[in-house]
Image (tube, grey):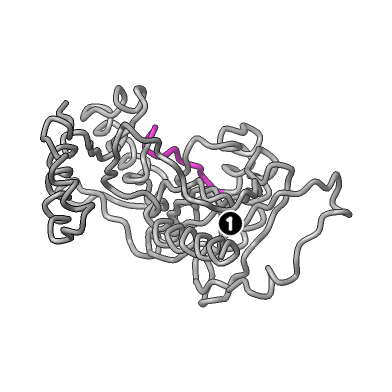
Amino acid sequence: MRNCRQKNVGPLLQRVIYGHAEDWEKLFKRVQNSTASSLRRQKPKNAEARRIQWTTGKNLNRWFDNWEEDLVELGFGTRDKTGAVYIPLEQLSRIGNFDETCINLDGSNTQRGGRPDVVMYDPRFPVVGLATSKSSLTSTLITGSTAAGEVFPPHIQFQSKAKNNDTEKINVSVIKYAQRVKGKFGCAEVRLWPITFGMNEKGGMDNEEFEKYIRGAILPLFPDVEDKPGYRILLKVDSGPGRSNLKLLVALKLLGVYLYPCVPIMTHVSQETDQCYGPFKTQFLQNLKDVCEGRLS
């Protein structure tokens, strides 16, 4: 690695010190050329080993072939003369996908929108972080949409130290500023649907809270649900908590609701709902940064 001492900047530095200001640019370029080789750049492409091993053309084709077969078998689509699956618009509104995203107040969750594509750094100096909130308060936001483009009402899971339902509290301003969502879903006309809330100790999903979410937030959107072709609901889900609850799966199937596993070990690129989180999390992190900087100043 080259060092600026090898470039003999001593005389030039002396001229700058003794009043030759016009030599600043020359000095800067010389130092820059001497240290540029020390800079590194990278575009993070971290991936788990199991994700790399599973994501093969054979496995992906197998999943999508099974997806087509199940759509036809459950009555969501039919095959045309060419063998392609056709899904009518009324059935697209009954195929949904939702996902969870962590919302915290310490500014550390920057998976979407907050991380630059390329990071420049000098390995000789420590990489320090920006000043931000030190709150460890964390909530979970769940939302999604149907294949027809209708957005599910968001669900917010708050942290609470309450030991029973009687002692749970929520700030009334949360309800005041929560916007309702317009959609038709399984109803005869378009309606306005409210945001739903939940509470538990960690502010995240578990078997109990996931079942409450399905029954309290998703099923009311489809009052006509029935376990027969044309009236079923197909929900694509990841492998998060509560998805493999056998008791819930059986109960939902009897109602005509099918939880369908998404492509395994996905990234945010292939998870449909994750694509919708980008603008929201970008603005959330920017607002959090602005508030913290305003408090510091």
Q: Quadrant of the C terminus?
A: bottom right
* Residue that badge 1 annotates: 218
Q: Position of residue 15 (x, y in %)?
A: 16, 51
Horizontal and vertical percent position of residue 205: 63, 43
Crowding around mark 1 (Cα neighbors within 10 Å: few <14, some 14 to 19, many 20+) is some
Range drawn in magenta: 256-265
Give 138 or 241, whichever is nearer the viewer: 138
> In the displayed image of the protein, which residue is found farthest to the front?
18
Quadrant of image for the N terminus = top left
| Number of marks in picture | 1
Q: Is residue 147 visible?
A: yes
Q: Residue at x 40, y 39 (%)?
A: 127
Is residue 208 shown left or right of residue 59?
right
Q: Quadrant of residue 226?
A: bottom right
Q: Amino acid type of disc 1?
A: Ile
Return the x and y of residue 240 as percentages of the image width and height. 54, 37
Residue at the spot 50% in from the left edge and 35% down from the top edge: 239
Q: Does 258 lie within the magenta span? A: yes
Q: Nearer the viewer, residue 149 or 113?
A: 113
In screen coordinates, is 21 left or right of 249?
Answer: left
Kind of element beneath mark 1: helix
Task: Residue at 17% x, 44% y: name it.
Answer: 32
Question: Residue at (68%, 68%) from the top-left corner?
Answer: 174
Rendering coords of residue 209 (x, y %): 68, 45
Say if residue 223 shows up in the picture. no
Please tell me whether residue 184 belongs to the stretch shown in magenta: no
